Amino acid sequence: GEVYRGKLIEAEDNMNCQMQNITVTYRDGQVGQLENVYIRGSKMRFLILPDMLKNAPMFKRPGGKGSGTAGRGKSAILRAQGLCIPANIVQINRQS
């Protein structure tokens, strides 16, 4: 498909994206410039964001670790029933 590189102006909850100052690379390798583009979220394969956003505070989960919220899945059920020992408590002693 096509590759669109530019400044992300808005991203909606359904992944519809509005971008400005776009460099588009078409399937045949031709490169073009667009001032504005609006891409439907269901047509996107993936979105690459800058690495510097990895540690941005807006992407941190509220409360952090140990906030008291239950996880999902079978391990959360077993933890709630007291049938599962968390891995960080288990101690293995090796004999020489």
Image (cartoon, rainbow, N blue to C red):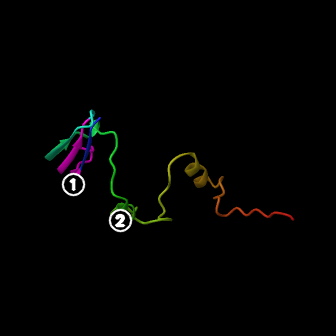
The part of the image, by quadrant, that contains residue 37 is top left
Instruction: Name the foreground residue: 48 vs 28.
Output: 28
Q: Which numbered disc, 2 or 1, marks the residue closer to the eye?
A: 1
The number of callouts visible is 2
Residue 69 picture location, percent across and down: 47, 59
Give yes or no for residue 55 being in the magenta stretch: no
Instruction: Locate the N terminus and report the quarter of the image it occupies.
Output: top left
Residue 3 picture location, percent across and down: 28, 42
Q: Is 37 left, or right, of 70 in this rendering?
A: left
Instruction: Name the foreground residue: 61 vs 4.
Output: 4
- Type of amino acid under label 1: Lys
Residue 37 visible at all: yes
The residue positioned farthest toward the left in the image shown: 35
Residue 77 picture location, percent across and down: 57, 49
Q: Secondary structure at mark 1?
A: strand
Q: Which residues are magenta?
A: 6-26
Q: Which residue is mark 1?
A: 7
The part of the image, by quadrant, that contains residue 79 is bottom right
Q: Secondary structure at mark 2?
A: loop
The residue positioned farthest toward the right in the image shown: 96
Q: Residue at x 26, y 47 (%)?
A: 13
Instruction: Name the foreground residue: 55 vs 1.
Output: 1
Disc 1 crowd, CA 10 A, few/some/many (<14, 14-19, 20+): few
Give yes or no for residue 12 being in the magenta stretch: yes
Q: Which circle marks residue 56 in the picture?
A: 2
Q: Earlier in the sequence, mark 2 or mark 1?
A: 1
Disc 2 crowd, CA 10 A, few/some/many (<14, 14-19, 20+): few
Instruction: Locate the C terminus and report the quarter of the image it occupies.
Output: bottom right
Q: Residue at x 22, y 51 (%)?
A: 6
Q: Is 5 left, or right, of 65 in this rendering?
A: left
Residue 36 picture location, percent across and down: 13, 47
